[in-house]
Amino acid sequence: MKIRGDIVRLYRNVHSWVGIMAGLFLFVAFYAGGMTMFEGVLESWSARPAALPAAVPVEHLPDLLQKAFAADPSAVANHTVIFHPDVAHPSSLIWSASHDREHGPARTVYAGLAPDGGLITRTQTPSQAASFINILHQRIGLPLGRESGRLVMGIVALLYAVALVSGTVVILPSLVRNLFALRLTESLRRMWLDFHTLLGVCSLPFHIVMAATAAGFAFQRPIMTLEQSLFRPAPYVESTLGGHDGAHAHHHGGGHPGMERPLLEPGALVASLAEQVPDFEPDALVYSTRNGKLSLRVTGHDTRHVTRRPDGGYVDVDPYGGRITSTDFLPGHQGGGFLALTTIYALHFGAFGGLWGRAGYALLGFGGAFLFYSGNRLWLSSRRRRERSAGLVQDSLGTRLLSVLTAGGMLGCICGVSVVFAAVPLLPEGGHYQSIEAIFYAVLFGCVVMAAWLGGERSTRPLVGLAGVLTLLIPVTDGLSRLLLARPITGNVIGVDIVALFYGLALVLTAMRATRALTGGGMEEAVRA
């Protein structure tokens, strides 16, 4: 395909500048995003199980609920019944003792029954390490609030889309000739460029999906607000905000909803659902109160259909009669519009293909992180060559600044995430959000300072080595804590520790093989990280 040279140069400049503007943020988003594919595994690995009896059978759940509500009537308003407790959710009944949507799991009460039928409760905050990684992904590494972080992420996603389009235009004229031409024997700069091109083109559909869905998530609320104000009549908006029909309303009784009308027992709810949707397998009953009305959302899965998230879909149910009130997100029973919306969510969250699908998405996420890292490195190399040709002996201020941010920011992100997970076994309750956040940003800032002190290029090798050592600490601290505290060892624990071990070794070996960071004279003497 032939494209005029001036057009290619224009798009190359657009691709370069937009890429370096968004690349630093996108590296964090993709590196943390790859890990969120196994957020449930990380939650299980970092969990500190409360000392509770065995799971309560379904037929004994009414007794548990009655005793729990008598001990804490406020639990009626927001509680969850879990049918298959695991390490991360170790009891059949839980409710939140505090509410903090910004920082992941809140302080939680876990309830069970003793052998003599008495109520046993334990209160603790679940480890918020996995939630922090997810929030770090959503807010592209910036310590912002939910709304402001979402808007900044949307702007970066739009820049990301521009970089994808311009990069595709640049590669089109030589696509057939150079796509699979990995010139390993030529200069290291050429090898990096070939890998960058191959990785970008082969993963282009994935990146298009990520850019489009991320922008949609970021601007969803403003778009819906504008749509309602322009196209919905006022009575419609008021009725939408007002909730459901009064026949299903639930009013506060004595300050606590759920005390005036008896809730349908969990066993009866499951039986009712089995009659209405036989192929849907419930996992939990999630009760919540909105506008003074108690609602029930039943989460579960149906492996035959696509779901909104990897952990399954959900259906809204009348908590008093067991009748389904909404199937908007019930797998296999959605209308066309909500099925399309679910597909968009599934494409972003990798909610299909089971374990192998999530593993593939994780690899694409880490590959995307390398794509942005290599893009910044290539831009720095080209910039230095131009500056040397212009007679500059040292890097300009802009080049030095980007070099420091590339080495300190990107490699600092790897170091920070590794320190967070290495610290989880040592922190109370597996780490609260504030302490985990402070650890991550302290390490990130320290790496940036180190890069500024040594110089962006000279700091690359020690930072890669540091990231490797810190990653190797994850299985060390985890293994020691489990040995000393007799904590259980599960398949998820072994998997996380093995992956961390091999990943840390790979980083250390990479640092050992590196000779020095990128130089202005070319990439032959560059770090091969």
Image (cartoon, rainbow, N blue to C red):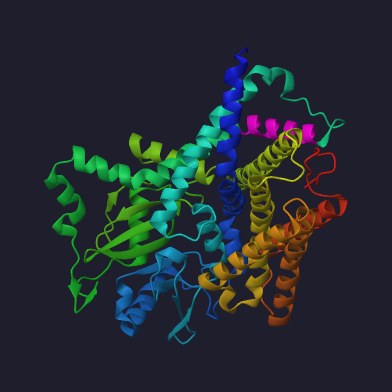
Question: Is residue 151 highlighted in magenta?
Answer: no
Please tell me which residue lies in front, 496 or 169. 169
390 sits to left or right of 258: right
435 sits to left or right of 443: left
Question: Is residue 192 highlighted in magenta?
Answer: yes
Whether residue 306 is visible here, answered yes or no, is no
Q: Predominant secondary structure in magenta?
A: helix
184 sits to left or right of 350: right
The quarter holding residue 343 reads top left
Please tell me which residue lies in front, 51 or 179. 179
User: Which residue lies at the image location 40% right of the left edge and 36% below the top edge?
Assistant: 340
User: Which residue lies at the image location 37% right of the left edge and 57% below the top edge?
Assistant: 298
Please tell me which residue lies in front, 48 or 415. 415
Answer above or below: position of 275 versus 440.
above
Q: Position of residue 273 (x, y in %)?
A: 35, 54
Count all numbered tags in the image, as a single digit.
Answer: 0
Q: Position of residue 469 (x, y in %)?
A: 77, 64
Magenta-colored span:
189-203
Q: Position of residue 347 (x, y in %)?
A: 50, 40
User: Which residue lies at the image location 87% right of the left edge and 31% below the top edge?
Assistant: 185
The quarter holding residue 287 reads bottom left
Quadrant including the N terminus: top right
Answer above or below: position of 307 versus 13.
below
Kindly give the residue lying farthest to the left in the view shown. 235
Kindly give the residue lying farthest to the front in the view shown. 391
Please tell me which residue lies in front, 391 or 523. 391
The quarter holding residue 246 reads bottom left
Q: Position of residue 366 (x, y in %)?
A: 65, 46
Whether residue 16 is visible here, answered yes or no, is yes
